[in-house]
Image (cartoon, rainbow, N blue to C red):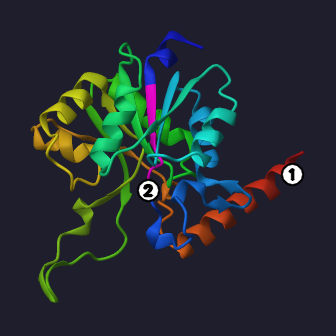
């Protein structure tokens, strides 16, 4: 493992209940073409070959996801499972505390974005190494977006200025730790970039990928399964 890899830590947030998916279990435990979303997400991190440390945040009291983490072949990685909190920021803080103090770059990744390609990890890390304190991958928005108040449309933003933001989001470790320390009362944020933005720190956009979509609904899971099965079929044809 290179010295650069040892200084990159990844937090995989796998503490979601998966209510909208309707499977009656934590979302990261849901199987996609025979494998759990957590296993697929761990495979994606390992395929990127960028990280030296992985911290997996699981629901408090969980045993099944912890078993997956303990059974996963780290291949030189340090991998740890930690209990999450009642909100996303608290869960990320728990994952951050589990990373070694000498980690210089932290990636925060959703287990539900299990099919994120390695090049997204690489583009985010490259931007942080290039001097950006915070980086988010994103793709252009194809739908027209409306701002509403109740049932009334109040504005239509120019979609050319909009991006659908994905994970992994990358941060200079000191920037991320500082943002969490300064914003402990924020519980409604939906990503870590919002905490950094609240301090006035600039956030840089990196190229995302359509495959980094978030598995939230049954339709998303059907799409993810189709993608995985197609990739397997193509791999078998190449052998």
Q: Are marks 1 and 2 in contact (CB under 8 Å)?
A: no
Residue at horizontal 64 percent and vertical 19 percent from the top: 76
Instruction: Give the image location of residue 186, x and y in percent.
Output: 16, 48
Q: Is residue 127 visible?
A: no
Residue at horizontal 45 percent and vertical 60 percent from the top: 17
On the image, numbered disc 2 is attached to which residue? 16
Query: Could you say which is closer to the camera, residue 213 or residue 77?
Result: 77
- The image's mark for residue 236 is 1
- In the rendered image, the residue lying farthest to the front is 61
- Quarter holding the C terminus is top right
Q: Secondary structure at mark 2?
A: loop
- The image's mark for residue 111 is none
Examine the structure image and report whether residue 35 is included in the region drawn in magenta: no
Magenta residues: mostly which secondary structure?
strand
Q: In the picture shown, does residue 218 fall above or below 109? A: below
Please tell me which of labels 1 and 2 falls first in the chain: 2
Tally the numbered discs. Answer: 2
Residue at horizontal 56 percent and vertical 39 percent from the top: 118
Mark 2 crowdedness (10 Å alpha carbons): few <14, some 14-19, many ≥20? many
Instruction: Give the image location of residue 132, x and y in percent.
Output: 27, 29
Instruction: Give the image location of residue 160, x and y in percent.
Output: 26, 63
- Quarter holding the N terminus is top right
Query: Could you say which is closer to the camera, residue 112 or residue 238?
Result: 112
Q: Magenta residues?
A: 9-16
Q: Quadrant of residue 83?
A: top left
Q: Secondary structure at mark 1?
A: helix
Q: In the picture shown, does residue 186 fall above or below 31? A: above
**Label 1 to label 2, Cα distance in Å?**
33 Å
Q: Is residue 66 visible?
A: yes
């Amino acid at each position: 493992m290179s010295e650069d890899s040892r200084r990159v830590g990844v937090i995989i947030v796998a503490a979601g209940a998966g209510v909208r998916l309707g499977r009656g279990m934590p979302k990261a435990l849901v199987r996609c073409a025979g494998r759990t979303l957590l296993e697929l997400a761990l495979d994606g991190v390992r395929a990127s070959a960028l990280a030296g440390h992985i911290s997996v945040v699981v629901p408090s009291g969980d045993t099944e996801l912890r078993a997956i983490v303990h059974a996963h072949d780290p291949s030189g990685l340090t991998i740890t499972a930690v209990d999450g909190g009642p909100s996303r920021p608290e869960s990320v803080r728990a994952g951050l505390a589990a990373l070694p103090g000498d980690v210089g770059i932290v990636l925060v990744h959703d287990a539900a974005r299990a099919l994120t390609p390695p090049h997204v990890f690489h583009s985010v890390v490259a931007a942080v190494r290039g001097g950006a304190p915070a980086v988010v991958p994103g793709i252009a928005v194809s739908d027209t977006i409306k701002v509403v108040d109740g049932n009334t449309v109040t504005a239509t933003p120019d979609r050319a200025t909009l991006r659908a933001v994905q994970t992994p989001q990358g941060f200079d470790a000191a920037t991320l730790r500082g943002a969490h320390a300064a914003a402990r009362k924020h519980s409604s944020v939906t990503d870590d970039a919002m905490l950094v933005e609240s301090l006035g720190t600039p956030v840089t956009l990196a190229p995302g990928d359509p495959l980094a979509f978030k598995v939230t609904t049954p339709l998303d899971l059907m799409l993810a399964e189709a993608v995985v099965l197609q990739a397997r079929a193509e791999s078998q044809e190449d052998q």
